[in-house]
Amino acid sequence: MTLDGRLLSNVSVMAAVVEGGSFASAANALGLTPSGVSRAIARLEGRIGVRLFDRTTRSLSLTDEGRLLYANINPLVLGIEDAVTLAAGSSGAVRGRLRVNTDAFSSRLLLAPHLPRFLAQHPDLTLELIAREQLGDLVAEGFDIAVRFGEPPSSSLVARKLTDSRVVTVASPAYIARHGRPAKPADLAGHACLQVRNAATGQPFAWEFQRGRKLVKVPTAGRLLLSDPGTILETTLAGICVAQIKAVGIQPQLDSGALVDLFPDWPDERLPLYALYPSRHLPAAKVRAFIDFVMGVVAPAAMPAAKPGTRR
């Protein structure tokens, strides 16, 4: 198939449709009419001989063939944009729309307090921070980057490890005053322990403690089963229960004494934080800027790398 300017133009229109979620959004972004976008997609479909989108009056989604094509062309389209930016002498320009896929903990407790600073640093950037339980298909859904805890799945995505976070067992001073402080993990059998729902299984996470190579699992019980990180934090601060939480998201509460690390002598239960983005030679300036931003957020609470423990 001969590569020509019209083919490249139609491919760019397809990328804009996926990123915008509709023909109208793509038309607005490209300065075209919706009918012009529709004609470009029709020309591309005719050129390659497959249907790329399933379209109704209410919805728009990629076909399997469209998803495969987009997964392969999107890094190339973005690479062309970066090459043009570099040639223009403004490789540091951070502009446009940045779509970030993350988990609720990272969104609520890790990133949200620092977003005003990031937006102030990049006034030409629009940020979409989407919190969801599962990673999903990063490329097909038009995300630029994902920031998530846990070992990344095997895929074509670039996985850059940002930090390891301790998983700490905490309680408020008020809880300790009423119920006493457990001296060792096994003592938690007599305490109200907050259960956190595992999105993958629907069951509570197991409570584990690691010190060097020693790994201990402790049965716990409690009347609360939660999944929202904000609710988990507020409930623990209110003195209702003991909880296990990633330290990187609650460092201010630990530093102020609002929460107490009950077992500092069990420091090696950890969970890695990764940035995931489509594989290509030159990440977009906006992606690089967001990674630098996250690194700046996690750096104060970063700990020496260790073997990950339980997935909290």
Image (spheres, rainbow, N blue to C red):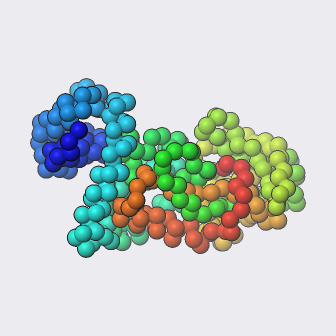
Say which residue appears at 31% left-offset and 70% top-offset: 91
Say which residue appears at 27% left-offset and 72% top-offset: 90
Does residue 14 appear left or right of residue 213 in this picture? left
- Residue 281, percent from left and from top: 40, 59
Say which residue appears at 37% left-offset and 30% top-offset: 64
**Depth check, front residue: 254 or 4:** 4
The image shows residue 130, relative to residue 47, as above or below, that is below
**Depth check, front residue: 254 or 238:** 254
Question: Residue 203, located in which quarter of the rendered image?
Answer: top right
Question: Residue 174, located in which quarter of the rendered image?
Answer: bottom right
The image shows residue 1, relative to residue 89, as above or below, that is above
Q: Is residue 248 visible?
A: yes
Q: How many marks?
A: 0
In the picture, the quarter occupied by the N terminus is top left
Say which residue appears at 71% left-offset and 49% top-offset: 310
- Residue 137, percent from left and from top: 45, 40
The image shows residue 136, relative to residue 65, as above or below, that is below
Q: Is residue 128 visible?
A: no
The image shows residue 160, relative to residue 49, as above or below, that is below
- Residue 184, percent from left and from top: 87, 57
**Depth check, front residue: 116 or 176:** 116
Single out the residue that lies furthest toward the front.
Answer: 2
Does residue 277 appear left or right of residue 149 in this picture? left
Does residue 304 appear left or right of residue 29 in this picture? right
